[in-house]
Amino acid sequence: MSDGELALGDTPRAKGPWFLVPEGTAATGCRSCRAVAYWVTTAAGAQMLVDCAVPGGRAPTATEAGEGVSHFATCPQAKQWKGAGKGRRGAR
Ligand SMILES: [Zn+2]
């Protein structure tokens, strides 16, 4: 119950927006920085790589959903992502 108090001065929650990661979502690695992250589908139907290894984040388990922020925001190699989308659309 004292988690909230501690969080105020100790571990600030990472900046959102936050995304829910459904239970059972398999962990994957970021192609750029190899961080562990999770692919989820947003309400808009877009694929989003979510990083749960952030302050206040929770990794999903087989039975419990997790929560994290967009890895595009936390990835140290984020600059590569912007270029990666161009000209590679549809490449699988
Ligand atoms: Zn990354």
Image: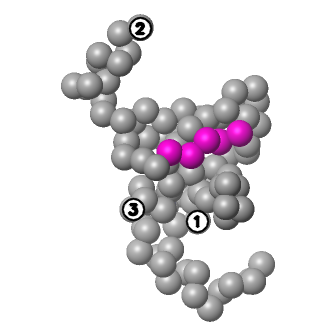
Mark-to-mark CA distance, 2 and 1: 38 Å
Residue highlighted by disc 2 = 1
Residue at 51% from the left image edge and 54% from the top image edge: 70
Q: Position of residue 81 (x, y in %)?
A: 50, 74
Q: In the rendered image, is residue 73 in sight?
A: yes
Q: Is mark 3 within 8 Å of ligand 1?
A: yes
Which of the image's four quarters has the C terminus? bottom right
Residue highlighted by disc 1 = 31
Residue at 56% from the left image edge and 46% from the top image edge: 19
- Give the mark, 2 or 1, whose residue is nearer the N terminus: 2
Q: Could you say whether the residue bearing mark 2 is in a helix, strand or loop?
A: loop
- Give the mark, 3 or 1, whose residue is nearer the N terminus: 1
Position of 58 relative to 36 (above/below): above
Magenta segment includes 20: yes
- With 44 as the anchor, is 80 left or right in this view? left
Mark-to-mark CA distance, 3 and 2: 34 Å
Residue at 43% from the left image edge and 41% from the top image edge: 54
User: Are the residues flagged by discs 3 and 2 in contact, CB closer than 8 Å?
Assistant: no
Position of 70 relative to 23 (above/below): below
Magenta segment includes 35: no
Instruction: Identify residue type, mark 1.
Output: Arg
Give the quadrant of residue 24. Answer: top right
Q: Residues within 10 Å of mark 1 (few under 14, many from 20)?
A: few
Q: Could you say whether the residue bearing mark 3 is in a helix, strand or loop?
A: loop
Residue 8 vs residue 53, the one in the foreground: 8
Q: Which residues are magenta?
A: 18-22
Residue 43 vs residue 4, the one in the foreground: 43
Residue highlighted by disc 3 = 76
Instruction: Identify residue type, mark 2.
Output: Met
